[in-house]
């Protein structure tokens, strides 16, 4: 294992995912969200099919699953999460959406006890509590600052946390690559059914943006794949929290968003709790607790 190289790859992957999110926000502001997500899934599916064809065992092995229903459920959760999150970008912006979504790893901690039978210490429950306090600081209920769209990232965090816990559950008797392959493959089928009826003609000036979006989608997933091939998950996972830093920079620079003080304080609490939880659990390689959205 080369953890130093893995850390650099993780930072590059997180930066690419942040750019992908920014492009999602830009495109979904001009085109139907379902159409934008559909194109994203087409690219992701093409990526995993290409990987499968290059593997010695071929495409048939990638399609072989011991838990087809669980794979379908994972794919459905991921589709919902991505669609709702991209829609949230258009309503409340990148910074506010990701500040709330950062609580996702802590929801995974809360779900790991009842679903996976993992032992949850008081320290781990405390991190969940601190994270929820951070969310309340961001949302400021009763202050009239945020409306109902601010709850959308919290919903997506729950769906992605459920997806991650189910991934860990299936990983007990399922090979890694089918679990990586199926959400992209099934998700592309689902999104084609949802997105094609919403198709809008793409303006000539937007084709380069869509092309960049497609390229970044492939690059981000390739970098993440390489990260886990060369490094231990426990060594690289804390650097995933740089996602919010990159998102804040992009939101402020290109979309004129503001990083309000309550959002900064709340996000800092959530991220600190998440990093402490990672330190507590010493996640084993291949842990899906903090996977990044494809």
Image: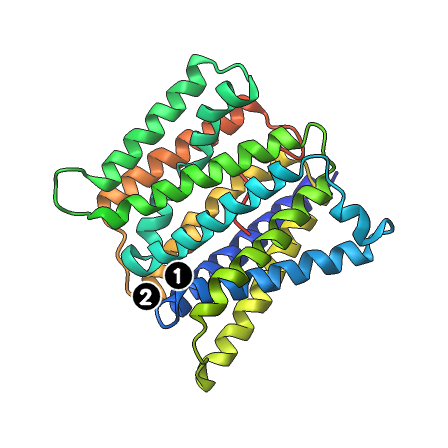
- Residue 235 location, quadrant: top right
Q: Which residue is mark 1?
A: 250
Left or right of 66 on screen, residue 41: left
Question: Residue 82: image x %, image y %?
Answer: 46, 52
Question: Circle 1: is it few (<14), some (14-19), or many (20+) Cα within 10 Å?
Answer: some
Q: Is residue 8 visible?
A: no
Image quarter of residue 169? top right
Gap in Å between the C-alphas at discs 1 and 2?
7 Å
In the image as oriented, which residue stretches furthest toward the bottom? 204
x, y percent for residue 167: 60, 35
What residue is disc 2 on? 255
Q: Residue at x 54, y 56 (%)?
A: 190
Quarter-wise, where is residue 74 in the image? top right
Do residues under tags 1 and 2 come within 8 Å of each other at their CB atoms? yes
Residue 279 lies, in percent from the top left, at 52, 26
Q: Is residue 293 left or right of residue 248?
A: right
At 67% from the left edge and 62% from the top edge, which residue is drawn? Answer: 46
Instruction: Name the mark on residue 127.
Output: none
Numbered label tally:
2
- Label 1 element class: helix
Asked whether 71 or 138 is in front, the reply is 71
Q: Work out which residue is located at the far left of the displayed protein and give it.
A: 143
| On screen, residue 254 above or below 74 | below
Q: Is residue 254 visible?
A: yes
Is residue 129 or residue 51 the one in the foreground?
Answer: 51
Q: Please tell me whether mark 2 sits on a helix, a strand or a loop.
A: helix
Q: Residues within 10 Å of mark 2 (few under 14, many from 20)?
A: some
For the residue pair 103 and 8, the one nearer the viewer reads as 103
């Amino acid at each position: 294992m080369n953890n130093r190289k893995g850390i650099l790859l993780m930072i590059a992957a997180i930066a690419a995912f942040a750019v992908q999110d920014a492009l999602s926000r830009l495109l979904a502001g001009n085109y139907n969200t379902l159409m934008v997500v559909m194109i994203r899934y087409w690219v992701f599916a093409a990526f995993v099919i290409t990987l499968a064809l290059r593997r010695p065992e071929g495409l048939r092995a990638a399609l072989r699953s011991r838990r087809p229903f669980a794979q379908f459920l994972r794919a459905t959760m991921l589709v919902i999460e991505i669609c709702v999150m991209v829609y949230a970008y258009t309503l409340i912006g990148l910074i506010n959406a990701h500040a709330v979504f950062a609580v996702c790893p802590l929801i995974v901690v809360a779900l790991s006890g009842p679903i996976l039978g993992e032992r949850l210490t008081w320290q781990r429950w405390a991190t969940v509590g601190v994270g929820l306090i951070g969310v309340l600081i961001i949302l400021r209920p009763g202050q009239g600052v945020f409306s109902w769209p601010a709850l959308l990232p919290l919903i997506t965090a729950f769906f992605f946390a459920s997806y991650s816990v189910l991934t860990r559950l299936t990983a007990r008797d399922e090979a890694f690559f089918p679990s990586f392959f199926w959400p992209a493959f099934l998700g592309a089928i689902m999104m084609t059914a949802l997105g094609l009826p919403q198709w809008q003609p793409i303006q000539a000036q937007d084709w380069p943006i869509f092309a960049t979006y497609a390229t970044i989608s492939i690059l981000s997933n390739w970098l993440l794949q390489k990260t886990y091939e060369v490094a231990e998950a426990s060594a690289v996972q804390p650097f995933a929290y740089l996602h919010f830093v990159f998102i804040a920079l992009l939101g402020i620079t290109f979309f004129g968003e503001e990083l309000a003080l309550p959002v900064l304080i709340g996000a800092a609490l959530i991220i600190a709790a998440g990093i402490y939880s990672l330190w507590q659990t010493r996640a084993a390689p291949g842990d899906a607790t903090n996977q990044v959205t494809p």
